[in-house]
Structures are given as structure tokens and as C-alpha cells.
Image (tube, rainbow, N blue to C red):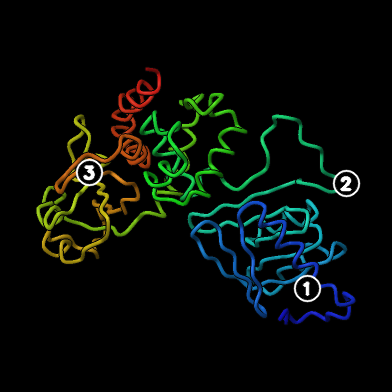
């Protein structure tokens, strides 16, 4: 099964066992690894990533890893710091049996360092653990809804999962991470240090959840939403179009799915050189909303304003951020 261009006899038949060690280490962080011939598959939340892999030995020089110019998934018993730094600079991914790993792709970041081994320092009680990116898309959905609805944090895990559009397992991971980083009050009664958590979430939105949800970009009249709100569908408005303080052509919309017939009926052009409309997927459950046009959740409106470098947008985001924080202060 593990045909890889490696002389397995050199490992005394131990390569499958050593690969199992890497697989087990990654599984502790919710990452699944499979190898089939020269190709490795990684599953991170709902993301499925593929890349050619190679086994590397500690004594090999880091510059031997990528002499052919390709990008690799490097697997090893131990990835030394020098090789880890070289791999990250070159665009390679890596993982070892000690639990160190690095994977960067669209909407995905895994960065686990110094988990064990003679060079690792023991974790102090209460200190944050090395973990998957807490603002990866699925985890960010959970944080988004808990920031949006202060009472949701104390609801059942299943309720949080349903409202956030994720699995129960993802919610459990998020709650464990927030607890270790002291963003939860004792007993999960409320969020703690909300301003810091909100800033972390908005900072990660552009390259994480925002990119993951994007369905398309178009040029056209953002006011022409009639075709989108028919047949029992809801449209959520965000960004500049949802701000009372801004007047401009830009808009962001959240819909359950991209309907190209509605795009055509709205006279939006998908091939515009300067798109002013962004359409993203609605991930959250909103049982209170009926068909029609509504404002998107405040957390998303804030992130969509801050995603640009427009000083008008940043100024308009200030009262929106204060409104979100006020909800948690009550």
C-alpha cells in the first residue's frame, strides 16, 4: 500500500508503522491522513487536501527536500526546527510522530509546534495548548454565532451546532479551545474577554471564513434584489449596503445557494473587471426569518466592513463593534 519510491528494506519494514505514528498524532487534532502510493490526503474539518508526500530522515539536509521545485508533504519521526522553518518558507507541509505539523491552504491553517520530544518544554497547567487554527472556517462559524447571540454559549452543544451549521464535534473542539484560552466564564455561562475574541475573529475572516463562504463576485446594481427574494428565499445584506452611514455601489449578500437565474435576472455580470458585489453562502440557521431581504448578522456586517482598507468602512465599523460588545455587557 505504501508505494512511495522509498526502499522499505532500509526501514526494516517499519515504514507503515511509522506512518501510523504520524496518522495517530494528527488525529489528536482532528486531522485525518491517508496515503495511497505517492499521494497523501488530509482532511481538516470539511476541507480535503491532496499532495505528494515523502518520508524524510533527521540527518538529511533541509535543502534536499525540494530540489525538484515541487511542493511536498514531508513526513518524519521528528521534524527538527531547521527543517520545519525551511519547509514553511518553501511552501512545503510537514507532520511527524511527535505531533508537529504545518499545513497552509485556502481557508486552512494547521500549525502545531513543540509538542513533545527532548527539545520540547512541558506545558504549564492552564497554559494554552498547541492546536489547530481556532479560526479555521468551521470553528469560525461557531465563534461567529456565539458572538452574535450572547445566550448561545450556554445552550446545549447540539443547539450551538444547529445554529452554527457545523457538527457537534466541531462545537466541542471550539468550546475546549475557548476554555483553555480563557474566553469562557466558569460554567460556560458567558463569553469572557469578548473584545479580544471579536478582534481575533474579524482579523481571520478575510483569508478564513470569508474566503470559504464565497460563492461569486459580480458587477451590477446591488439594489436589484427582487429575483433573489422570491420563491421563499431569504437574502441577507452585509458590508457597505447594510450600513446606514455609507452610500456606495458595493454590497455583500448571503444566500443559501448561488442561483445563476437570479444573477441573470438581476443583470449582474460575473465577468466584470471591477466587481462590486460579493455573494457568500449563508451557513447559519435562522428560523425566525422569512423570505425577503434582511440584514446579515452584526458580526458578519462588521467583518465585511473591516475586510477592506477603505477608511470610510473602518469608521462605520466602530459603532457596529460597540453594539456587539454592548450585547455581551448586559
What number is the disc on residue 237? 3
What number is the disc on residue 16? 1
The answer to which quarter of the image holds residue 155 is top left
Classed neighbour count for the residue bearing mark 2: other residues with Cα under 10 Å, few (<14), some (14–19), many (≥20)? few
In which quadrant is the N terminus drawn? bottom right
Q: Earlier in the sequence, mark 3 or mark 1?
A: 1
In space, the residues marked 3 and 2 are separated at their CA atoms by 53 Å
Classed neighbour count for the residue bearing mark 1: other residues with Cα under 10 Å, few (<14), some (14–19), many (≥20)? few
Q: Residue at x 85, y 45 (%)?
A: 119
Secondary structure of the residue carrying numbered label 2: loop
Front disc: 2 or 1 = 1
Residue 172 at x, y percent in the picture:
54, 43
Front disc: 3 or 1 = 1
Residue 49 left/right relative to 256: right
Image height check: is 63 above or below 224? below
Q: Nearer the viewer, residue 192 or 225?
A: 192
Q: Which residue is disc 2 drawn over?
A: 118
Circles 2 and 1: CB atoms closer than 8 Å: no
Q: Nearer the viewer, residue 109 or 161?
A: 161
Residue 241 left/right relative to 325: left
In which quadrant is the C terminus drawn? top left
Residue 86 at x, y percent in the picture:
72, 57
Q: Nearer the viewer, residue 303 or 11?
A: 11
Image height check: is 256 above or below 308? below
Q: Nearer the viewer, residue 311 or 1?
A: 1
In space, the residues marked 3 and 1 are separated at their CA atoms by 51 Å
Secondary structure of the residue carrying numbered label 1: helix
Q: Earlier in the sequence, mark 3 or mark 2?
A: 2
Residue 306 at x, y percent in the picture:
37, 37
In space, the residues marked 2 and 1 are separated at their CA atoms by 24 Å
Q: Residue at x 51, y 24 (%)?
A: 193
Amino acid at each position: 500500500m505504501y508505494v512511495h519510491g522509498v526502499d522499505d528494506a532500509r526501514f526494516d519494514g517499519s515504514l507503515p508503522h511509522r506512518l501510523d505514528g504520524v496518522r495517530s498524532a494528527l488525529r489528536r487534532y482532528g486531522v485525518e491522513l491517508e496515503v495511497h502510493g505517492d499521494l497523501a490526503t488530509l482532511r481538516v474539518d470539511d476541507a480535503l487536501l491532496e499532495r505528494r508526500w515523502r518520508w524524510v530522515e533527521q540527518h538529511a539536509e533541509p535543502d534536499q527536500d525540494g530540489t525538484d521545485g515541487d511542493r511536498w508533504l514531508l513526513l518524519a519521526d521528528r521534524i527538527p526546527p531547521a527543517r520545519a522553518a525551511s519547509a514553511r518558507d518553501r511552501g512545503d507541509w510537514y507532520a511527524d510522530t511527535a505531533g508537529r505539523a504545518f499545513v497552509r491552504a485556502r481557508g486552512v491553517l494547521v500549525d502545531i509546534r513543540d509538542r513533545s520530544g527532548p527539545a520540547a518544554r512541558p506545558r504549564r497547567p492552564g497554559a494554552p495548548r498547541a492546536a489547530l487554527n481556532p479560526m479555521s472556517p468551521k470553528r469560525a462559524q461557531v465563534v461567529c454565532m456565539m458572538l452574535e447571540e450572547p445566550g448561545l454559549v450556554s445552550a446545549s452543544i447540539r443547539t450551538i451546532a444547529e445554529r452554527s451549521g457545523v457538527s457537534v464535534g466541531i462545537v466541542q473542539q471550539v468550546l475546549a479551545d475557548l476554555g483553555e484560552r480563557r474566553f469562557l466564564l466558569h460554567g460556560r455561562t458567558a463569553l469572557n474577554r469578548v473584545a479580544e475574541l471579536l478582534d481575533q475573529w474579524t482579523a481571520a475572516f478575510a483569508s478564513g471564513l470569508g474566503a470559504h463562504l464565497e460563492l461569486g463576485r459580480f458587477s451590477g446594481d446591488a439594489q436589484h434584489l427582487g429575483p433573489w427574494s422570491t420563491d421563499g428565499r431569504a437574502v441577507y445584506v452585509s458590508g457597505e449596503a447594510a450600513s446606514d452611514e455609507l452610500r456606495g455601489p458595493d454590497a455583500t449578500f448571503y444566500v443559501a445557494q448561488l442561483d445563476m437565474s437570479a444573477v441573470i435576472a438581476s443583470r449582474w455580470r460575473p465577468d466584470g473587471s471591477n466587481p462590486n458585489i460579493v455573494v457568500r453562502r449563508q451557513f447559519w440557521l435562522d428560523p425566525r426569518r422569512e423570505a425577503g431581504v434582511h440584514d446579515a448578522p452584526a458580526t458578519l456586517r462588521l467583518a465585511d466592513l473591516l475586510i477592506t482598507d477603505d477608511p470610510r468602512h473602518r469608521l462605520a465599523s466602530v459603532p457596529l463593534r460597540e453594539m456587539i460588545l454592548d450585547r455581551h455587557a448586559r
